[in-house]
Each structure stands twice: as structure tokens, then as C-alpha cells.
Image (spheres, rainbow, N blue to C red):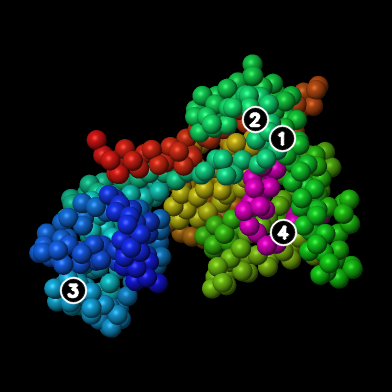
């Protein structure tokens, strides 16, 4: 597939008459496109050295993977089997081709790494958040002849989300009523979100009513989906429709790919404590989970099985649900309707993360480890941070500390603020966080800003 994507991709563009001025590789999967670009130039009369230099000027590379094992590597035998025609067209020896994908060009036992090829044949490279840029510089320091890690030429541009595609219809209509029917064209601008967060434009009562509407819609959606799922359950396991979830409860959501490092069931490491929280009739909380695991990720599948089991056969029944068949529609319902978006990856393995970036436009607050984008987004007033801006070396200690810090933040700050209501039933401090999230996060962590940054830094550098 790497040959099809990289080499085939360039040839398809040529057939379509498309001549990009920049080839932007996301991850190493398409890195063979650099070989095809070199082949074209050599066929036009350039030497290999000239072709490589000119190809490098055309390419930039974005890495998304902070784990060594996540970078594709191929043995010399496999490369010699599948690439003889390309090697011949490049007019180089097999060992010279292998050297393009090796950190140590002369190490004959070192496999061919697609990321190394992309880094060697690009004029610029970046990670997808500030912390991920640091991790990437450390990971690939050996590839570059630099004295310090900070001199490694890998920068960062933090990911963003496409707001028009993620803002739910109910919320879009509400925003138009507040800012005018033609206001949506400015949805990516800082001024747009400053206005909607301005107390003279939107009162606390209006924001709180908006949040209640979105939460209620999520609860109704979840009940319908769980009613369908319940048809496959035994009668004694079925949960009565009207006792499933609570429209007035603090609703905590977790929906994403169930990769092991994302630690979906971390909150349930303190199971008895969580049971006490959901059983509190004065300050009730509830959890909605959704997501899918990679077909070959057995541990991720076990996470789903555990949460699904807890939702049906434990004291959390009725207060914890797992929505099956996760897709964009489910995601849009959850990011809009949840009050809190839970994110507890094992730092620093979350290169960026984007699910939490979709929440702010709906007034949903992030509760997250300071990893990926949230390390840059969090300012102390626009959501909640789990733990400090650091992590222990031991995985076991990290899991223990993070579970403790998550429970501490939940019980000492999140729950009290949500249920601290005035005489009108409005949680003023909570709404202030919602305003700050809208004003500070939404206009920064979107694709409009991201593409502008790529253009200014890499596509058309000044």
C-alpha cells in the first residue's frame, strides 16, 4: 500500500494534470513519493544528487507518532524484492537506496524506515503539538548532526478541527440567533467567539439553558440507541427507559479510538469511589462512553468489554452507558451534549488529540491530562487539568498518580463547581469557564488557523 499511495499517488496526479508546488506527507506511509519525484527528475536528465536536492525542496513532512514502534520499517530483503525497478530507475545501488531509509546508512542490519526517508527528503518537518515536537526532536536526534536536541530541525504546528463540520445543528441555530443569520462565515475568527462569550451579548441564563438543551438531546439520543442495543439483551439485563441516565446530572463523556495508551477505563480504577459519586442524589454524575478499537488491538477491545460489562452488570448500571457503532453522528451528539470531556492518555503519547477541540463550541469543558493540544490550550480558567505538566518515568506510577489526580480534580473542583448554583439555579463559576473556553480555545484550535500556519511556515515561507 505504501507503493500504491506514494508512487501511485504521484502518477495519478500527473495523469490528472495536477502539478503541486508542495508535496505534504502526513506520516511516512506516502514517503515513496519522494523516490518517484526523484525518478522523474533523473529521467529528465538530472543526476541523482540534483534530483534528491530538488525533490527535498518540494516536500514537507508531518509526523504524528510519538512511539518508535508506530513508524513503518521494512527489512532489506523485502526492499530488494519490491523495489528493484525503482532502484534501477534511480541509477543507484541497493545499499544506496537502503541508506535513504536508515538512521545509520552503513548499518546493513538496520531496516528501511519510511519516516527516515520522509525526514531526509523534506525541506521542513513538524510534529502536531508543542510537546509532540519536543518528543519528535528527541526521537530523531540521532538522525541529525546537531549538538543538542533543541537544534534538531523538527518544529510543530498544533492540529485543529473543522468547525463548520462539527458544530451541531441545534448549536448552529442558537449561534445564528445570537450573532445574526450571516455570522457563520466568521465562525473561525477570534472576534466571533469573543462576542458569543461576552456577558453583554449572552447572559449566564442563556448559556445555561443552551447547555441544558444540548445535554437533554444527548440523553434522548443515548436512550434511543440503547433501546436498540437492548433488544439483544436478556430481559433481566435490560434497563428501563425512564431510569436510564438523568437530564440534570453532570454528564462526563469519553468517545474516541480505544487505543491502549488512551486508558479509557482509568477512572474506574477507583470503582467504589465512583459508585458513591453516581449514587449521590444531591450531586449526581453519569458517564457516556463510545468508541472503537483497532481490529488487531486486543487490549483496546478488552477496555471496551470492561466498560460495557460495568454498564450492564455493576452498580454503575443506569449511570454508565456504552454507545455502540461509534461514528461521526455519535461523536457530534456527545461533544455537544456532555458537560465534561474526559481525556486521560498516558503522557506524552497523545501527539495532539482533537476530540476535545470540538467541545468548546458547544460549551463542553475539557478535563484532561496536560498532553498534546491541551497542554497549550489550558490556561487555568477554561477547563480542568489532571495532574501537573510532567509525568513519572514508571508506567505503573504514572497510572496510579493519574487515577488519583483525576479523582481529586473531579471531586474537589469539577463536581462542586457544576452544582454550586445561585438562587436562580445557575452555576455562575461554571458558566465563566464555559465563556473562557469559547473565547480562548475555539478560535485557536481549528483548521483555519492550522492551514494558515502551514502556509506561512512551510508552504509559502516568507
The residue identified by callout 4 is 322
Mark 3 against mark 4, which lies toward the viewer? 3
First-in-chain label (2 vs 4): 2
Cα separation, mark 1 vs mark 2, equals 13 Å
Query: Residue 178, image x and y in percent?
Result: 66, 24
Mark 2 against mark 4, which lies toward the viewer? 2
Q: Nearer the viewer, residue 268 or 353?
A: 353
First-in-chain label (4 vs 1): 1
Residue at figure coordinates x 45%, y 56% from the top left: 349
Residue at figure coordinates x 70%, y 43% from the top left: 337
Q: Secondary structure at mark 2?
A: helix
Cα separation, mark 3 vs mark 1, equals 61 Å
Mark 1 against mark 2, which lies toward the viewer? 2
Q: Any mark on residue 175, and which?
A: 2
Cα separation, mark 3 vs mark 4, equals 54 Å
Q: Quadrant of residue 56?
A: bottom left
- 368 left or right of 268 in image: left
Asked whether the beta carbons under mark 4 and mark 1 sit within 8 Å of each other, the answer is no
Q: Any mark on residue 155, and which?
A: none
Instruction: Spot the residue most to the top.
Output: 200
First-in-chain label (3 vs 4): 3
The residue identified by callout 1 is 211
Query: Where does the magenta region start and end?
Result: 315-340
Crowd band around label 1 with a 10 angstrom C-alpha radius: few (<14), some (14–19), many (20+) = many
- 390 left or right of 323 in image: left
Query: Residue 22, image x and y in percent?
Result: 29, 50
Cα separation, mark 2 vs mark 4, equals 30 Å
Amino acid at each position: 500500500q505504501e507503493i500504491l499511495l506514494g508512487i501511485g499517488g504521484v502518477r495519478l496526479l500527473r495523469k490528472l494534470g495536477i502539478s503541486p508546488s508542495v508535496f505534504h506527507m502526513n506520516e511516512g506511509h506516502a514517503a515513496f513519493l519522494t523516490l518517484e519525484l526523484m525518478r522523474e527528475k533523473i529521467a529528465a536528465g538530472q543526476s541523482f544528487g540534483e534530483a534528491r536536492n530538488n525533490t527535498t525542496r518540494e516536500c514537507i513532512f508531518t509526523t504524528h507518532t510519538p512511539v518508535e514502534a508506530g513508524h513503518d520499517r521494512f527489512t532489506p530483503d523485502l526492499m530488494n524484492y519490491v523495489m528493484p525497478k525503482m532502484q534501477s530507475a534511480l541509477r543507484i545501488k541497493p545499499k544506496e537506496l537502503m541508506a535513504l531509509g536508515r538512521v545509520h546508512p552503513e548499518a546493513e542490519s538496520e531496516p528501511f524506515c519510511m519516516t527516515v526517508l520522509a525526514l531526509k527528503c523534506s525541506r521542513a518537518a513538524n510534529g502536531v503539538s508543542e510537546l509532540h515536537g519536543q518528543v519528535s526532536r528527541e526521537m530523531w536526534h540521532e538522525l541529525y548532526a546537531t549538538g543538542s536536541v533543541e537544534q534538531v530541525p523538527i518544529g510543530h504546528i498544533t492540529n485543529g478541527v473543522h468547525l463548520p463540520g462539527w458544530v451541531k445543528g441545534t448549536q448552529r441555530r442558537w449561534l445564528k440567533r445570537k450573532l445574526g443569520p450571516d455570522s457563520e462565515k466568521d465562525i473561525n475568527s477570534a472576534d466571533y467567539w469573543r462576542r458569543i462569550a461576552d456577558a453583554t451579548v449572552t447572559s449566564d441564563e442563556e448559556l445555561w439553558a443552551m447547555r441544558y438543551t444540548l445535554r437533554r438531546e444527548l440523553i434522548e439520543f443515548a436512550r434511543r440507541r440503547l433501546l436498540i442495543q437492548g433488544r439483544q439483551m436478556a430481559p433481566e439485563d435490560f434497563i428501563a427507559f425512564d431510569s436510564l441516565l438523568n437530564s440534570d446530572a453532570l454528564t462526563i463523556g469519553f468517545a474516541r479510538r480505544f487505543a491502549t495508551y488512551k486508558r479509557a477505563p482509568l477512572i474506574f480504577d477507583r470503582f467504589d469511589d465512583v459508585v458513591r459519586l453516581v449514587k449521590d442524589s444531591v450531586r449526581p454524575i453519569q458517564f457516556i462512553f463510545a468508541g472503537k478499537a483497532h481490529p488487531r488491538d486486543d487490549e483496546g477491545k478488552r477496555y471496551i468489554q470492561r466498560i460495557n460489562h460495568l454498564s450492564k452488570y455493576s452498580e454503575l448500571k443506569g449511570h454508565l452507558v456504552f454507545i455502540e457503532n461509534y461514528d461521526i453522528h455519535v461523536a457530534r451528539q456527545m461533544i455537544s451534549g456532555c458537560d465534561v470531556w474526559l481525556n486521560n492518555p498516558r503522557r506524552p503519547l497523545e501527539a495532539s488529540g482533537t476530540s476535545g477541540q470540538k467541545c468548546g463550541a458547544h460549551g463542553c469543558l475539557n478535563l484532561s491530562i496536560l498532553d498534546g493540544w491541551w497542554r497549550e490550550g489550558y490556561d487555568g480558567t477554561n477547563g480542568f487539568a489532571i495532574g501537573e505538566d510532567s509525568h513519572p518515568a514508571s508506567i505503573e506510577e504514572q497510572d496510579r498518580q493519574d487515577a488519583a489526580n483525576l479523582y481529586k480534580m473531579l471531586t474537589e473542583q469539577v463536581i462542586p463547581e457544576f452544582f454550586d448554583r445561585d438562587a436562580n439555579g445557575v452555576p455562575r463559576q461554571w458558566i465563566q469557564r464555559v465563556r473562557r473556553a469559547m473565547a480562548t480555545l475555539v478560535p485557536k484550535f481549528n483548521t483555519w488557523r492550522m492551514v494558515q500556519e502551514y502556509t506561512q511556515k512551510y508552504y509559502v515561507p516568507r
